[in-house]
């Protein structure tokens, strides 16, 4: 687990809300505090879908439990846009099953993909600062820290690729 403080808040806000850069991530939750606190639960509600839609979902990569950021992003943007900055926000993103498979397939990884429950990126804005915090969870106790190291390196590279300057705190 690492905590990365983004140096220029405007840049990550643009990357998160105005671009497609984070769209492939899954959303566990988003909480935005402006004049009210808005909480978005990213868990899919299967009762909403028709049986045909549900079957299609289960046969695609979207057989996950969460919505994609690209589906939630417009709502978050509507809540945040305006002349005043939010009091705070938190977005909890998960790596897709495909990305987890890719990380587990790395020769430096000593953990099988089926043991990795999730790889998480928490993006938090508070007191004018944005911090990105990585995390991981497993289906069983795992002493091997290679997954965390690979995930941390992946997130550092991702933020760099997005042109976001950061420092580790």
Image (cartoon, rainbow, N blue to C red):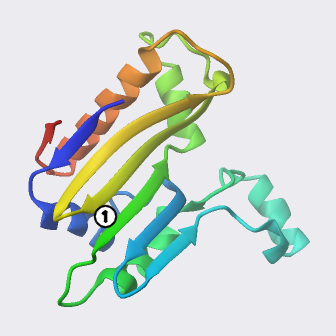
Point out the image quarter for the N terminus. Answer: top left
**Regarding mark 1 in the picture, which secondary structure is present there?**
helix
Point out the image quarter for the C terminus. Answer: top left
Question: In the drawing, does residue 124 fall left or right of residue 83?
Answer: right
Residue at 85% from the left image edge and 61% from the top image edge:
55
Question: In the drawing, does residue 148 fall left or right of residue 115?
Answer: left
Q: Residue 14 at x, y = what percent?
A: 22, 69
Residue 13 versus residue 156 in the image, above or below: below
How many labels sit on residues?
1
Residue at 55% from the left image edge and 71% from the top image edge:
40
Residue 140 sits in which quadrant?
top right
Question: In the drawing, does residue 87 fall left or right of residue 53?
Answer: left
Q: Which residue in the protein does label 1 denote?
A: 16
Q: Residues within 10 Å of mark 1 (few under 14, many from 20)?
A: many
Residue 69 versus residue 6 in the image, above or below: below
Q: Residue 56 at x, y = what percent?
A: 79, 62
Residue 145 versus residue 148 in the image, above or below: above
Question: In the drawing, does residue 107 fall left or right of residue 6?
Answer: right
Residue 135 versus residue 35 in the image, above or below: above
Q: Residue 35 at x, y = what percent?
A: 36, 88
Residue at 18% from the left image edge and 42% from the top image edge:
160
Residue 37 sits in which quadrant?
bottom left
| Residue extending farthest right | 51
Q: Nearer the viewer, residue 23 or 94?
A: 94
Q: Residue 39 at x, y = what percent?
A: 52, 73
């Amino acid at each position: 687990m690492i905590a990365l403080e983004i140096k220029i808040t405007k840049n990550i806000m643009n990357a998160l809300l105005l671009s497609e850069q984070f769209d492939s991530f899954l959303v566990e939750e988003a909480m935005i505090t402006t004049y009210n606190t808005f909480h978005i639960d990213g868990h899919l509600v299967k009762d909403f879908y028709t049986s045909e839609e549900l079957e299609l979902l289960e046969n695609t990569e979207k057989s996950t439990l969460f919505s994609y950021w690209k589906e939630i992003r417009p709502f978050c943007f509507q809540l945040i846009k305006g002349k005043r900055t939010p009091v705070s926000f938190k977005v909890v993103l998960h790596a897709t099953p495909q990305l987890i498979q890719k990380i587990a397939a790395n020769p430096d990884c000593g953990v099988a993909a089926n043991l990795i429950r999730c790889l998480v990126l928490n993006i938090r804005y508070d007191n004018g600062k944005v911090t990105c915090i990585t995390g991981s969870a497993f289906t069983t106790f795992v002493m091997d820290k290679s997954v965390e190291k690979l995930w941390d390196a992946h997130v550092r590279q991702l933020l760099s690729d997005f042109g976001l300057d950061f420092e580790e705190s």
